[in-house]
Structures are given as C-alpha cells and as structure tokens.
Image (spheres, grey):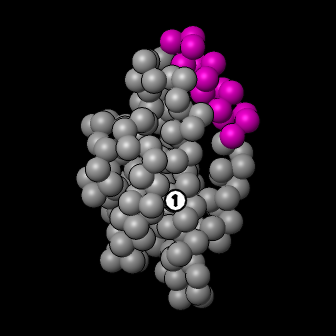
C-alpha cells in the first residue's frame, strides 16, 4: 500500500468504520472479532469510489444479514455460539456473492472485490443469510 492508500484507509477507519463496526456488533448481538486485511482492499484506479463501495460491499450486507439472523432468540444464540470471527479480504477479486462468502470453523470470510457490483447489497445480504442459516 502506498501513501494515498494508507491515507484513505486511516480516514475511513477514523470516520466511517467506528459506526459500521458498532452496527455490526449491535446486529450480531455480541462483540464479534473483525479481522480486516485492509492492504488487500485496493485497486488504484478506483480509490475515489471506496467511501461508497466499502460499506456496500463489506459492511452493510453483514449488518443486514445479522439483523435477519438475530430476529429471534434462537438466531441470536446460534450466531453467538457459532461465529467467532469475521475476516474481510480481497484475495481473488470475487464479485459474485456465492463465491465471495465462506463460513468454516467459526470464521465468516468475506473475500470480495472492493468495487465490483457494489450496488448489489441485497444479493450479498441474501447470500449471507442463506449461508449462515445453513451453517449455524
């Protein structure tokens, strides 16, 4: 990561991430560990879009999926007992949610391009709900 990516990351972490993290914790009903590999979440030519795309790709689908899962006590209990960590990365530039999400050994991995199909929040949310419901 170069200086401009480091600056963007620091600004995002200071300005947007605290609220998004708080919403994830609230939706999950517990303080789930977040492991974000920030250095993998860049494609230089799209840096100007990340303030909009990061929330839509990485955080809002998690918040909405957790709200759906924890809508009742059974869901809250299942998520709390099963989910140990959320890992966010971009190692394969996936843009299709069916390939971008995995859940194994208590780790929910989001391995998604930081820019592709950003506006398809609902598709990512549905995929996450389905994945979690089938694995909790």
Residue 9 spot, x, y in % from top left: 60, 27
Q: Is the magenta stretch mostly helix, strand or loop?
A: helix
Side of 13 relative to 117 (left or right) = right
> Is residue 126 something one can see in this rendering?
yes
Assign the C terminus to one quadrant of the image.
Answer: bottom left
Residue 89 spot, x, y in % from top left: 41, 40
Instruction: Specify few, some or many for label 1: CA neighbours under 10 Å numbering under 14, 14-19, or 20 or more.
Output: many
Side of 31 relative to 84 (left or right) = right
> Residue shown at 66%/26% (left/top)?
10
Q: Nearer the viewer, residue 64 or 29?
A: 64
> Residue shown at 59%/87% (left/top)?
72
Q: Which of 132 and 114 is in front in this view?
A: 114
**Residue 14, magenta (yes or no):** yes
Which of the 4 image quadrants contains residue 31? bottom right
Q: In this view, does 48 lie above or below 121?
A: above
Q: Which of 121 and 111 is in front in this view?
A: 121
Q: In this view, does 2 lie above or below 75?
A: above
Side of 40 relative to 52 (left or right) = left
Residue 30 spot, x, y in % from top left: 64, 68
> Is residue 105 something one can see in this rendering?
no
**Residue 124, magenta (yes or no):** no
- Labels in figure, total: 1
Question: What kind of element bears circle 1?
Answer: helix
Residue 95 spot, x, y in % from top left: 31, 44
> Residue shown at 65%/51% (left/top)?
21
Point out the residue furthest to the front here.
119
Report the magenta residues as a range. Answer: 2-16
Point out the residue furthest to the top here.
3
Where does label 1 land, which residue?
Answer: 62
Q: Is residue 31 above or below residue 51?
A: below
């Amino acid at each position: 990561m170069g200086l401009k990516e480091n600056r963007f990351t620091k600004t995002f972490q200071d300005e947007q991430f605290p609220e998004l993290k708080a919403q994830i914790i609230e939706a999950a009903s517990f303080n789930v560990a977040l492991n974000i590999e920030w250095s993998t979440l860049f494609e230089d030519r799209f840096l100007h879009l990340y303030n909009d795309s990061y929330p839509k790709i990485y955080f809002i689908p998690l918040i909405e999926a957790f709200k759906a899962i924890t809508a009742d006590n059974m869901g809250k209990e299942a998520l709390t007992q099963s989910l140990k960590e959320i890992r966010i990365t971009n190692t394969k530039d996936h843009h299709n949610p069916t390939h971008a999400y995995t859940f194994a050994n208590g780790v929910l991995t989001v391995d998604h391009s930081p820019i592709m199909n950003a506006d398809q929040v609902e598709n990512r949310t549905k995929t996450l709900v389905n994945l979690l419901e089938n694995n909790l």
